[in-house]
Amino acid sequence: MTNKRISDQRLIHQRIQQPLSLQPEEVVASFGAMQAQDYMQAVWAVGLRTPSAGLAQVEQAIEGRKLLLTWTLRGTLHFVPSGNAKWMLQLCAPRILRQAASRLTQLELDDKSLERCRKIIYNALKGGRRLTRSALMKLLEDQGISTSGQRGYHILWHSAYNGLICFGPRSGKEQTFVLLDEWVEHSRELSFDESLAELAMLYFTAHGPATVQDFAWWAGLTLTDARSGLEAVRNSLQLEVIDGSEYWINNGAAASIPVPGDVHLLAGFDEYILGYKDRSAVLEPETAPLIVPGNNGIFLATVVADGRVAGTWKRTIKKKGVELFVSPFATLDAPVIEGVRQAAERYAAFLELPLTRLEYLNLPG
């Protein structure tokens, strides 16, 4: 029942249940940052929380510079509000770059070579130009810079954490890069302490109930800095002690009443899973490895029933429609099966395609 109380509230505060009528950029703004390693999964994570928006509307928000995709918190990709990208980088980048120093040394990427890469990239993108990843890799190779063996990835990653580039809109099926200073015209300026407080308030509002350890992990902060951020906003939060641990939630938010038995198809890397260091409130220990097969860091899309992760799903998009395949962890009862069907229809509608197939794989027993 303890876990149920936590998961019920997280479903609501993460806007999975009872979402408000917000635009895609407003949903991301309410989170501060949303995990986005896989583009098509990330746009669905936004779409799930924006019932009135389809894929086209989410991508319009990207094209309109209302949403920004870049490397920010914890060394990984997130959607962030465009105006927040720079202060988030100023808060998080120094520590992340220090942690990456040994890996860059292994790849023989020293300060001089990385500076040369940044100059080449800047000259290629200045003036509002957009280039795909493959085009940038070719450009670097043509200049005698090897991009093999993850060197290309880390060159782009390092350039982003130095505030040079971010992702632009897609070109076909490939994402483009743009200059951050040209793409983001208006940025908020916050001090270090203001940034900690702002990030803490955003985190506990969208992710509560959550612990300070959850916040530190999510943001990639030291526990000391995470505690400083929490302390700055604690008067706006409500404390609840559950099984001896301190959980924080936005004042007044805990009065929300969840809808029992609801079923949701969550994106891979969704904040409902990745937003916490401790995921035991929504995920059984024995099934946790099933959403990260081979422990390779790739989190599969999940089926959530009544707040708990009940399986995984994948889809195949074809011209005639979308085919969806569900792998449950245990036998599903009839109401959950009907909930999966409704959730699958909603996902297909997000893509503006019909659902042409819904199949269950690896059925227990």
Image: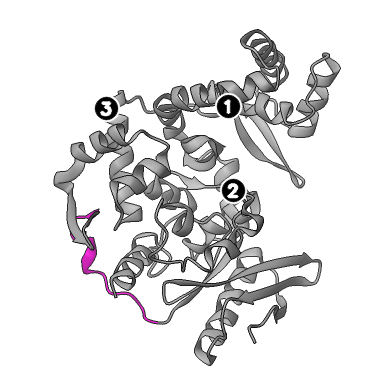
| Residue hosting label 2 | 60
- Judged by depth in the image, the label closer to the viewer, 2 or 1, is 1
Q: Residue furthest left?
A: 235
Q: Are marks 2 and 1 in contact (CB under 8 Å)?
A: no
Question: Percent x, y for residue 322?
Answer: 73, 70
Q: Quadrant of residue 120?
A: top right
Seen from the viewer's position, the closer of residues 148 and 194 is 148
- Of the residues shown, which amino acid type is indicated by label 2? Gln
Report, in whole angstroms, how far the alpha carbon at label 2 lies from the one at label 3: 33 Å
In what element is the residue under mark 2? helix
The circle drawn on residue 193 is 3
Residue 171 location in percent, x, y? Answer: 74, 41
* Range shown magenta: 249-260
- For residue 55, say whether it is visible: yes
**Residue 229 occupies which quadrant of the picture?**
top left
Q: Which residue is mark 1?
A: 160
Residue 186 among those drawn in magenta: no
Above or below residue 304? Residue 168 is above
Cα separation between marks 1 and 3: 23 Å
Spot occupied by residue 343 in the image (x, y as percentages of width and height): 56, 75
Q: Amino acid at mark 3?
A: Asp
The residue type indicated by label 1 comes to: Ala
Q: Residue furthest front?
A: 286
At horizontal 67% and vertical 31% (from top left) the residue drawn is 177
Lateral position of residue 119 relative to residue 232, left or right: right
Which one is in front, 92 or 134? 92
